[in-house]
Amino acid sequence: MKKRVFVTGANGMLGASVVRTLIQDGCEVHALIYPGSNTSVIEGVNMRVSEGDLCADLPLDEWLKDCDYIIHLAASTSIWPRRNKHVWAVNYDATLKLVEAATKAGIKRFVHIGTANSFDAGTQSNPGVEKGSYRAAKYGFDYMDSKHAIQTELLRKFKEEAFPVVVVNPTFMLGPYDSGPSSGKLILNALEGNVPGYSEGGRNFVYSKDVARAVVNAIDLGRPGECYLAAGENLTYKQFFTLVFERLGQKRKLRKVPHFLTLIGGGALSIWSRSTGVPPRLSFTMARMSKAGSYFSNGKALAELQMPETPISQAIDECATWLRNNGYVKLGSGFAGKTIVITGSTQGVGKTLAHAFLSKGANVVLNGRSAAKAEHLKHEFSFARNRAVYAPADVSTEEGAQQLIETTLQTFGRIDVLINNAGMSSYGDLEDSAPKVIREVLDSNATGSLLVTHFALPHLRRTKGSVLFISSLAGLHGLGGHSIYSAAKMSMIGLAQSLRKEMQRHGVFVGYTCLGFTENDGVKRTLAPDGTLEPVPSRPGIRPATQQYAVNKIMKQLQRKKFRSVHTFPGRLLFIVTRISEGVTMFAMKKGYDAERKFLEKLNRKRRETESISIAKKEAKPSGSFQEAQLK
């Protein structure tokens, strides 16, 4: 029999993940949302939805009679002003009203979402656990005080009345569906370049989907009367923002902001907010808190609730992608309304590029050879509605390449940018490689790029669009043990160089990108010498660039119409060394050519002088008839 779960606050960041996790587990969900609140994050979720303010009179008895469990997420997280009666009404009074209705309905488990601030934080080496006194009262936030008070009351009810409550206490959550945004504001500020520096403190950061799984598991695995810290990674603010900028592919020099300046700024903004009524980005109390370390352990939640432990880097990636795709990032792009075709975009850099262009308002045609991936990609890119289409086609064939362009024109009516990203990699010496490997690598990289570009060029000429070839450092200088792959990538650079000359008079931009060592998706495969597909091996001692770094560089190259872009420091160093080597060769050849040219000019000059003298002598010698006339 399916579990029937009543969920309050279902359209918040955590709530949106909780209801999806419940449905994934086969539960029936009845969601309660605040009247008039943003419901975009739960659109399309198969569940019953009711609107209602828990502070008002609601038909809770009617709603709960068909439910077995309650997950109570609804809360007011307002921290400005610090003292706020409404916060107590929502977090304390309304929760007690729900508890009363739950008791009457015979609810089997009441999972309450608290806050980690209800416990005493520790240090990075000795993080806090589900014990200790409540120390956050010194900050005077009604949000923290009310959440601690209701948690204390719920635990009392368990002890005295056997109320079946389990409390999950999340730390600072990051992830998708942050429609506020709330905690995602940190990532949004980084995306928009609004991070002036970092303060001395730090905190625990956790992936919201991990918390959602812990919350749902608490229904069966949580012990009544117990609290569970849903925590992730303990990071200083310097460590956190360094990681954020790395994941976003941004190069930023982080500066530490002295605490006294933070206090001055927070105080000034608090005074300004009291006079204007606009909440400050940083209040004086928040400035006080910024120096503290708020570090916690997730040991109990991992052991008892089987909470996942996803790296916070993934949470940052998903949060940034969600904010971009849903129009929160306010940056000029120049791609809005344009149609971008990306071959080989079902994974890796190609797929990340698709997300990035969609976030800039572009239309995107994704491509891959597998028709089976259509449904998965349709779901992943459903946020883009009709701005994204997947066209399965093998672009290394004439039919597939033509089909891709025709699908693009039928869907969007134009092509503005073609990115030739498709291409199979391989390893092994040429002598040891099977002929089918040669065909596969050359066809997927070189032939595919040639064919798609051939069919796209007439349409790119009309829009004065762009063609970009995604090559590799192997295309700059052949790599031993990768001769086939190097040949394929070099051919793409040669194609770009030739096509640039052909298209210059038509106003079509042509360029190429040499990716450095870049992180791969787990599903990425490469061809072994015998033609079998194998996982791409990691390179010991080499730290790959993030896919987001590559995407940022590619988009900047297209905006600036830069013919060549070589990624990563090792890649640029290789390019410089290659250029120096080629330069010496060209210098020597030019010297030889100049010497030969001077020799030929000198030889020609002597020949002309000799011919002139010979002609002059002929003209100076009198003819026989003329001499005879003179004698007569």
Image (cartoon, rainbow, N blue to C red):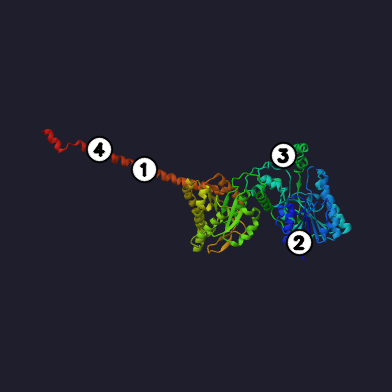
Circle 1 crowding by C-alpha within 10 Å: few under 14, some 14–19, many from 20: few
Pinpoint residue 524: horizontal percent, then vertical percent.
59, 59
> Residue 258 — which label?
3
> Residue 597 — which label?
1
Pinpoint residue 185: horizontal percent, then vertical percent.
71, 46
Pick whichever of labels 2 and 3 is earlier in the sequence. 2
Mark 2 and mark 3: Cα distance apart in space:
51 Å
Residue 526 can be seen, yes or no: yes
Residue sticking out furthest to the bottom: 1
Circle 4 crowding by C-alpha within 10 Å: few under 14, some 14–19, many from 20: few
Foreground pick, 449 / 236 = 449
Circle 3 crowding by C-alpha within 10 Å: few under 14, some 14–19, many from 20: few
Which mark's residue is nearer the viewer, 2 or 3?
Answer: 2
The answer to which quarter of the image holds residue 298 is bottom right
Pinpoint residue 461: horizontal percent, then vertical percent.
50, 49
Pick whichever of labels 4 and 2 is earlier in the sequence. 2
Q: Circle 4 is placed at which residue position?
A: 613
For numbered disc 3, what is the local secondary structure? loop
Pick whichever of labels 2 and 1 is earlier in the sequence. 2
Pointer 1 and pointer 3: residues touching (CB < 8 Å)? Answer: no
